Each structure stands twice: as C-alpha cells, then as structure tokens.
Amino acid sequence: SMRRALEAGKPVHIGTIKTIASSLGAPKVCDEVVSKALSHPAGTKSILVSDKEALAGTTLLLNEHRFLCEPACGAAIAASCRLETVIPNYSDATLVIIVCGGGNISYDLLHMYEEKVAES
C-alpha cells in the first residue's frame, strides 16, 4: 500500500494482502506516513520485490549471518541489492537496514515458504 500511496500522492486502499512478507502488508497506509514520506527532503523511493526475492534475502541472512528473520525483513535485504536502479550514486551514501527477527517465522514456516515460492 505504501508504493501505491507514493504513486498516487495519497493513501490508497489495496484490499487483500497476497505476499509471504505479510507483516509489510497494510490495506492502507495512514495519512501522516504518506505526508511525511512525500515531503521528506531527500525524497522517498519504494522498491517492490517479489516473494522469491524476499525469501532469498531471508535465506541470505540465515546462511551468512545465522540470523532467522521473517520475509518482510528479507524484502529489505532484497531491495538493498537493487539500489543502483533506484538511487543514483547510492554508493556515496550510508545505508542502514534495520534487521529484526519478528514473530512471524520459524523453520517450519521458512520451509513452507520455500515450497510455495518454488511452485510459483
């Protein structure tokens, strides 16, 4: 809903959330969040990643850092891999990604997501 709100310049109701990164989903972003994002001096960009990319980010954190996180966090990692397509000269900037485990993940869920993504 944030991506669509940024495109529309106002909050937009998106209906059903259909992603394994479910904690990122909100049917509608509140007015104040959209207003602050649109008026931020540095601008605000939205990078849309697929469930497959979000799961790859989750797996990367688990394999390389031994940190199990939910796909919403993996989506942030996946998006960071595409910054050069969205932010010119991003390599000159400092990048901070807040990584949290979240309550929406377990090894069983991770395997279920892997199966779901493999089927799509």
Image (cartoon, rainbow, N blue to C red):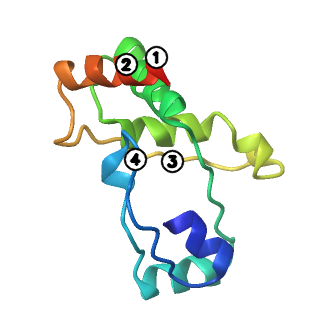
Circle 4 Cα neighbour tier, 10 Å, few/some/many (<14 / 14–19 / ≥20): few
Q: Provide the secondary structure element on which disc 2 rests.
A: helix
Q: Tell me the distance, in whole angstroms, between the alpha carbons under discs 2 and 3.
A: 27 Å
What residue does disc 4 label? 98
Residue 50 in picture, x, y percent from top left:
55, 37
Q: Is residue 12 above or below residue 60?
A: below
Q: Which residue is mark 2?
A: 114
Sequence-wise first label, 2 or 3: 3
Whether label 1 touches label 2, CB < 8 Å: yes
**Which structural element holds mark 1?**
helix
Name the residue: 36% across, 17% down: 115
Q: Secondary structure at mark 4?
A: loop
| Label number found at residue 118 | 1
| Pointer 3 or 1: first along the chain | 3
Secondary structure at badge 3 equals: loop
- Does 110 appear above or below 95? above
Q: Judge left or right: residue 103 versus residue 71.
A: left
**Quadrant assignment, res 10:** bottom right
The residue located at (22%, 42%) in the rendering is 102
Residue 116 shown left or right of residue 112 in the figure? right
Residue type, numbered disc 4: Ile
- Between 80 and 117, the one lying in front of the other is 117
Mark 3–mark 1 contact, CB under 8 Å?
Answer: no
Quote the CA–CA distance across marks 4 and 2. Answer: 23 Å
Residue type at mark 2 is Glu
Marks 3 and 4, how far apart in space?
Answer: 6 Å
- The residue labelled by disc 3 is 96
Which amino acid type is shown beneath numbered disc 1? Ala
